[in-house]
Image: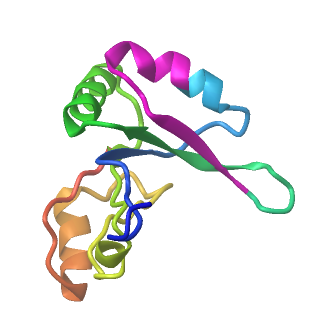
């Protein structure tokens, strides 16, 4: 038994905006050509077991996650980014915000100007 505490995958990708019918098997089929996958989990409602519209894809090595991320970006996939698996860092207050259904008049500058009042912003992307 490892006495140093729990271990977490070295690389985890968050995949959002999934259709409710997407399964782990479907994601595996789509993502596995880019590199070896340790595990995939579609997040589901604890009571109804319906998909919550997002999943995590875990890799043994960060390089495998980077290769998959690059592969998916060429496919114009939606909402794919690194996920922070370390519970200490998740509580740090640093993270990503997704905003859907924005008015078409909102651009990167307007988004940055609006949210910069709440703290430092590393990047804004309207897509």
126 versus 110 height, above or below: above
From which residue to which does the magenta span run? 28-44
Q: Position of residue 46 (x, y in %)?
A: 78, 62
Q: Residue at x 24, y 52 (%)?
A: 125
91 versus 23 height, above or below: below
Residue toward you, 14 or 118: 14
Q: Residue at x 20, y 57 (%)?
A: 108
Most extreme residue toward the front, as rendered?
1
Q: Residue at x 62, y 43 (%)?
A: 42
Most extreme residue toward the top, as rendered?
33
Image quarter hosting the C terminus: top left
Q: Residue at x 50, y 36 (%)?
A: 39
Q: How is the image coloured?
A: rainbow
Q: Position of residue 89 (x, y in %)?
A: 28, 74
Relative horizontal placement of residue 28, taking residue 60 as reference (left or right): right
Q: Is residue 40 magenta?
A: yes
Instruction: Please count the marks in the image.
Output: 0
Q: Is residue 90 magenta?
A: no
Which image quarter: residue 27? Answer: top right
Residue toward you, 114 or 21: 21
Image quarter hosting the N terminus: bottom left
Most extreme residue toward the right, as rendered?
48
Residue toward you, 108 or 60: 60
Which image quarter: residue 37? Answer: top left
Q: Position of residue 75 (x, y in %)?
A: 35, 20
120 versus 80 height, above or below: below
Residue toward you, 60 or 72: 60
């Amino acid at each position: 038994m490892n006495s140093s505490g729990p271990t977490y995958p070295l690389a985890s990708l968050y995949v959002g905006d999934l259709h409710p019918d997407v399964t782990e098997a479907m994601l595996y089929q789509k993502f596995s050509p880019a590199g070896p996958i340790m595990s995939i989990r579609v997040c589901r409602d604890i009571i109804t077991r319906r998909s919550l519209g997002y999943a995590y894809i875990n890799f043994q090595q960060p390089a495998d996650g980077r290769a998959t991320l690059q592969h998916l970006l060429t496919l114009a996939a939606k909402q794919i980014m690194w996920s922070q698996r370390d519970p200490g860092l998740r509580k740090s207050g640093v993270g990503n915000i997704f905003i859907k259904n924005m008015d078409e008049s909102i651009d990167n500058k307007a988004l940055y100007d609006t949210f910069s009042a709440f703290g430092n912003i590393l990047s804004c992307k309207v897509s």
